[in-house]
Image (spheres, rainbow, N blue to C red):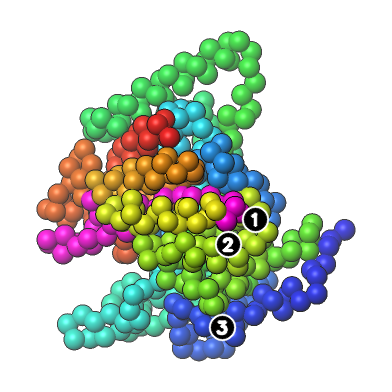
Amino acid sequence: MSVEPGPGVLEGLDAWRRLPVDQQPAWPDEDVARRARERLAALPPLVFAGEADELKAKLAAAGRGEAFLLQGGDCAEIFEEATADRIRQKVMTVLQMALILTYGASLPVIKMGRLAGQYAKPRSSDTETRDGVTLPAFRGDIVNGWEFTPEARTPDPTRLLDAYHTSASTLNLVRAFTTGGFASLLEAHRWNRGFMTNNPAYSRYEEIATEIDRAIRFMVACGADFEALRHVDFYASHEGLLLDYERPLTRIDSRTGTPYDCSAHFLWIGERTRRLDGAHIDFFSRVRNPLGVKLGPTATGDDAVALIDRLNPDGEPGRLTFVTRMGAGQVRDRLPALVEKVTADGRPVTWVCDPMHGNGIVSASGYKTRRFSDVMDEVAGFFEVHRELGTVPGGLHIELTGDDVTEVLGGTEEIDDEGLARRYETRVDPRLNHQQSLEMAFQVVELLRRS
Ligand code: PEP
Ligand code: MN
């Protein structure tokens, strides 16, 4: 028995088309774009509504302090990099961080990737100029190519389908890893293969893995059943930016007759597209997934409450996550007003810290980077504010990779400006590398224990 959508629900999913819409590409050929949308609409969903509901319940728990969200992955995924090795390294990094946090803070950790769909990027300018040549800006692999040629930079709607298929194969591998035994806690001590250096974060990880191993062997000897440890729930998320992708992948859940955006479990609305009268807020208000909204230093308490009015009027727990990204210098000044206003409103939100996007700098040699110390300072400020106000720091949203890139300054490896050149690979924002990610997890354990 399938439940039909109520009156006006399907029409409502297209109401955004009459509203101001930011950050969309100008497709050169509308016929090709229409055919790509139609094809997407006919393809199977990438995730199921039931999984999104399950995640919503877990995010509600994070909002109450009974769980902690760890959301991490690339700033922008790249089609060519969706290889088994890279995906495995990334997933493993998130799992290792989650293990450190779970063990250190005795809290269930919700594991979520910025992956299997994180292909569209908002840009501050529509164009890029190099040596007097101006071309469309790179908007992510789902829109155009990175190469600085007119051919590559022209938006190509057939990329919508490439994004779908690459997301599907990524998700397939993630599901195989996380349910097929690879992510089993019984294997945690084996995930440290590849720790080549003497980084202190690595030796601490090995210690934890050994302790967990011993505890598990003890319990196995006692006859405990470990089925639950063999499987990990790993959720997919991306910025819900490109509406020509999100709309066709939105489907009616046959259990309830309500729409879900089945491109990912969790979608967030970025700092640049969260205007209240805009297309993104209207569209996402109509799907039932758990949603995030980024809030930068200019957001006010009234903005936050207005977003709750639009996206979670009934105060459903777990529906709305505010991902604050204030910058280390501003988080202690700006965050309290938001939290106070939202707390007074009473409808629940889950507060998550993105310590990446408010801390961008350009290094002396010209790299777009961030300082690890600023990143950690924003996380510390986020915990301090919530501790003072008696509210809950519910999670972390970070840009990371499982590879040994050199994109963020500092960490115990002490990557300096010269070091950035060694392996700077990102096409958009700088990511924590594998060691820096584990270091962060150890530092966050200390903060969680105090909160
Ligand atoms: C991002 O998450 O990569 C991003 C662009 O963030 P924000 O919307 O917070 O600037
Ligand atoms: Mn980014």
Tell whether circle 1 marks a residue whose Cβ is less than 8 angstroms from ligand 1: no
**How far is disc 3 from disc 2 in space, using C-alphas?**
19 Å
Task: Please tell me how crowded label 3 is: few (under 14), some (14-19), or many (20+) other residues with Cα within 10 Å.
Answer: few
Q: What range of the chain is rendered magenta?
A: 345-372
Q: Is residue 89 left or right of residue 414?
A: right
Compare marks 1 and 2 and give the one earlier in the sequence: 2
Is residue 87 at least partly visible in the picture? no
Task: Please tell me how crowded label 2 is: few (under 14), some (14-19), or many (20+) other residues with Cα within 10 Å.
Answer: many
**Circle 3 SS class:** loop
What is the three-letter code of the residue carrying label 2?
Ile
**Circle 1 SS class:** loop
Compare marks 3 and 1 and give the one earlier in the sequence: 3
Comparing labels 3 and 1, the label whose residue is closer to the camera: 1
Comparing labels 3 and 2, the label whose residue is closer to the camera: 2
- In the rendered view, tell whether residue 29 sits above or below residue 229: below
Name the residue carrying label 2.
308
Name the residue carrying label 1.
315
Q: Is residue 201 left or right of residue 396?
A: left
Residue farthest to the right?
1
Residue ID at (36%, 32%): 446
Name the residue carrying label 3.
19
Task: Please tell me how crowded label 1 is: few (under 14), some (14-19), or many (20+) other residues with Cα within 10 Å.
Answer: some
